[in-house]
Image (cartoon, rainbow, N blue to C red):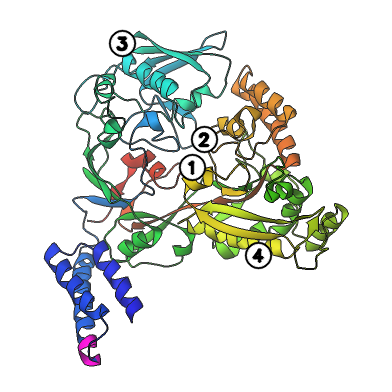
Amino acid sequence: MLRKIKYYRLLIYQCSLPLYWKQVVNTLFKILNRNKLPLISFRFLFTLSLFIVSSFISQASAHLNEKPNILKVALGSEPTTGFDPIKGWGKYGNPLFQSTLLKRDKELNFVGDLATKWRLTNNKLTWIINLRGDVKFSDGTPLTAEDVAFTYNQILQQGSSHDLSILKMAEPLTPNSVAFHLIDCDITFLDRLSSIGIVPKHLYQKTSKNKHAYGEKPIGSGPYVLNQWVKNQYVSMSLNPFYYGKKPAFPKLIAVFGSEESRFIQLKMHQLNLSVIPQRYANQSIAGYKLWSVPTLDNRGIVWPMTYQQDKNATYVSADPVIREVFDYLIDKQLIVDKLLDGYATPAYSIADNMPWGLDTQNITVKKTSLTHANALLKKAGWVDSNRNGVIDKQGHEASFTLLYKSGDSVREQLALAIRSMAAQVGINVDIKGLEWNAIALQMTTTPVLMGFGSHSASEVTYVYHSRYAHTDFYNSGGYKNTKVDTAIDNALKASSWQASIPFWQEAQQQIQHDRPWTWLVNIKHLYMANACLNLGTPITEPHDHGWPLTANIEEWRWQCQ
């Protein structure tokens, strides 16, 4: 009973009870929690509390088909550095409050957003971009090449998750044209132009003394304006009156933040029109709601520390290529897809399956799960259980390590549990530990981590596998280095055209597949639960981030009930 009280107290905070009634119900629950009431009184007060809550839920349900004045959504995680493109906002999705130079269509081809034309000079070291002349920021000031150049140069100077190390400088040529001068040839540079939102130079300079000021109250040229951000709770937004594109059908939005559990409670109470959901809730139907499954490039895998460090036993294990090969035969990817993720995923074999810079899954030989073969490989390499404690060892090192994953992420936790169970079958001991990313960052160079990537750009191959990014941020955290891979990637970047670069990406992938710096597990499908009246149009194939990228086609969203 006390567990039910705790659940329903959480429930009333997530619902839209008027403040007075929230206080009444909360007081009743406090009395119940003392657990010193006669049984009859206890049941009466508990029933009364639930009656009050359920009456308001019933009212919400009665208006389920009516078009809301404010569309309430839960689009995933709250950006820790705010809504500032210079600090990384929008990297894996639509910046929403700002505009980008280019964007992707349904086939992931480039189309213009702020840009009307773009061309590469003959020496392949400068991109010339022509801009629309009719764009204004939400404060009414014109957006010009000065703002574009300022945005890119600020990222270059400050550094962020947007990697612009290949850029020498951005230069405004005219009010409506800008040049990007590169240090070296990079066929993937154009991809950056579809992920970096443009900020107003005049405003950003004014707020430069407070490094968080712009991100907390951004001004941009995107379809929406951020009105209020109550941290750890929600952001409210309204249509940008100066937006140059097709205006969305919903004049006001509220995006709420919270745990997977709290978001699903709000869905069940009809307090949200749309929410991201993890796979574990996919088969829990809610009356009046529809499940949307969106294809993605979002993957999960284990990144292995590749160099042995004497004081770190885990690195002795992960640096052994036989151990990494054995995991190909231990991990039953299809079982994970079918049983853990309810079919809302596919087995993964590279950083971008079926993309030109990844592996074509129809042309690779899938290794079948085989404990017999795994045991034979281990024995041949000298991994045996000499201590008879159930854990194999070699030269005084036990095959034991901790696998880190992001805490609060149920999909990663499920994957970690499955890996632990499958590895134990051949005497490999895997402890699992959920931590926040800042804590993982302190250990990831010497401890295997369950990570994910997935981008619309081939540049991610460079970041994750090229030796110059070894131990750089969350990219090549395992310190993978192979000169053959470096050469193939460099040749791809310097290719005369995108088409000419593809064989080099494939060459790199073949060597990567042989070295196994990662054990790829699954490609995740992004799931959303939406009011059945809310039509989300045709979402594009989404990158790694789950939630905000869904807004890339927000102008297509419609309320289809009368």
Residue displayed at 55% across by 46% down: 452
Q: Which residue is mark 1?
A: 541
Q: Quadrant of the C terminus?
A: bottom left
- Which labelled disc corresponds to residue 175? 3
- Which labelled disc corresponds to residue 456? 2
Secondary structure beneath dot 3 equals loop
Residue 205 in the image, given as x and y percentages of width and height: 27, 21
**Mark nearer the viewer, 1 or 2:** 2
**Mark nearer the viewer, 2 or 4:** 4
Labelled pair 2, 4 in contact (Cβ < 8 Å): no
Name the magenta segment's main secondary structure.
helix
Question: Which label's residue is closer to the chain start, 1 or 2?
Answer: 2
Name the one closer to the observer, 14 or 282: 14
Residue furthest to the front in view is 311
Labelled pair 1, 2 in contact (Cβ < 8 Å): yes
- Which labelled disc corresponds to residue 421? 4
**Mark nearer the viewer, 3 or 1:** 3
Label 4 neighbourhood size at 10 Å, few (<14), some (14-19), many (20+)? some
Residue 241 in the image, given as x and y percentages of width and height: 19, 32
Q: CA distance from mark 2 to mark 3?
A: 30 Å
On the picture, is 16 further left or further right than 456? left
Q: CA distance from mark 3 to mark 1?
A: 34 Å
Query: Label 2 amino acid?
Result: His
Residue furthest to the right in view is 380
Question: Which label's residue is closer to the chain start, 4 or 3?
Answer: 3
Query: Label 3 amino acid?
Result: Pro
Residue 349 in the image, given as x and y percentages of width and height: 66, 46
**Start-end of magenta stretch:** 39-43
Q: CA distance from mark 2 to mark 4?
A: 33 Å
Q: CA distance from mark 4 to mark 3?
A: 61 Å
Query: Label 4 amino acid?
Result: Ser
